[in-house]
Image (spheres, rainbow, N blue to C red):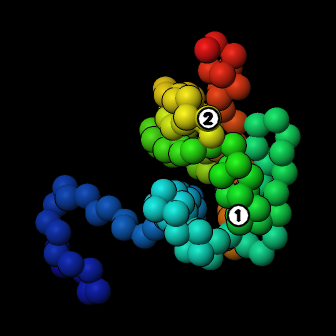
Amino acid sequence: MHTAGMSNLGDGRIVVGTARSERGDAIDLVRRWFDATSTRDLAAAGDLMAPGPRITVSGGHRFGSLQDFAEWGARRYAEVRKQCDSFEACEAAGGFAVYVRGEMQGAWKDGTPFSKVRWCDRFLVQGGRIVDLETWSDLAESRLAE
């Protein structure tokens, strides 16, 4: 059987759609943000964020720009590297929430190293831009254990 406008797939074949979902697009956006921040390309990462993003980190520290967040981190840490173990997205009020989990390692400003610290970031993506970032980690717990 041949139907006009369709390819002849034969009997019993399955057609799989290849269209991207908004959820997949939100995850891709956050992956690009991590790629940019991991190479310290704050301009590229900032371009993926809406103007005046809300950034909140463990301890309730709040920032209105990626630059302010990076400057705060530079005063605390000699270096930080995040390993992303999973990306998950779901619908949220006004957009999609993308949760990213993993472990981080690095060193405090005094040179004391840390490793295998669990973290979780939640990004809110609206209209193709990151408007909100909340991040939590066990970093304080690891400092207490030293």
User: Residue at the top extreme?
Assistant: 145
Mark 1 vs 2, N-terminal side: 1
Please give the residue where the numbered disc 1 appears in the rendered image: 66
Amino acid tagged 2: Asp
Q: Nearer the viewer, residue 129 or 75?
A: 75
Q: Residue at x 49, y 35 (%)?
A: 105
Q: Residue at x 61, y 14 (%)?
A: 146
Image point (66%, 22%), residue name: 143
Relative image position of residue 115 (x, y in whole percent)? 49, 28
Q: Amino acid at mark 1?
A: Leu
Q: Is residue 61 at all visible to an observer of this figure? A: yes
Left or right: 40 in relation to 46? left
> Which residue, given by chain and number where applicable, does mark 2 sit on?
110
Q: Position of residue 5 (x, y in %)?
A: 29, 86
- Residue that appears at 70% across and 26% down: 140
The image shows residue 16 at horizontal and vertical percentages of 32, 61
Relative to 109, residue 44 above or below: below
Can you tell which of label 1 and label 2 is closer to the viewer? 2
Pointer 2: residues within 10 angstroms few (<14), some, or many (20+)?
few
Q: Is residue 62 above or below residue 82?
A: below
Q: Is residue 1 left or right of residue 73?
A: left
Regarding mark 2 in the picture, which secondary structure is present there?
loop
In the orientation shown, which residue stands out farthest toward the bottom? 4
Residue occupying the far front of the picture:
110
Residue in front for this viewpoint, 96 or 64: 64
Regarding residue 92, the answer to whether it shows in the image is no
Q: Nearer the viewer, residue 16 or 91?
A: 91
Residue 113 shows which numbered tag?
none
Q: Decide: is 74 above or below 64.
A: above
**C-alpha distance separating marks 1 and 2:** 24 Å
Q: Position of residue 133 (x, y in %)?
A: 72, 53
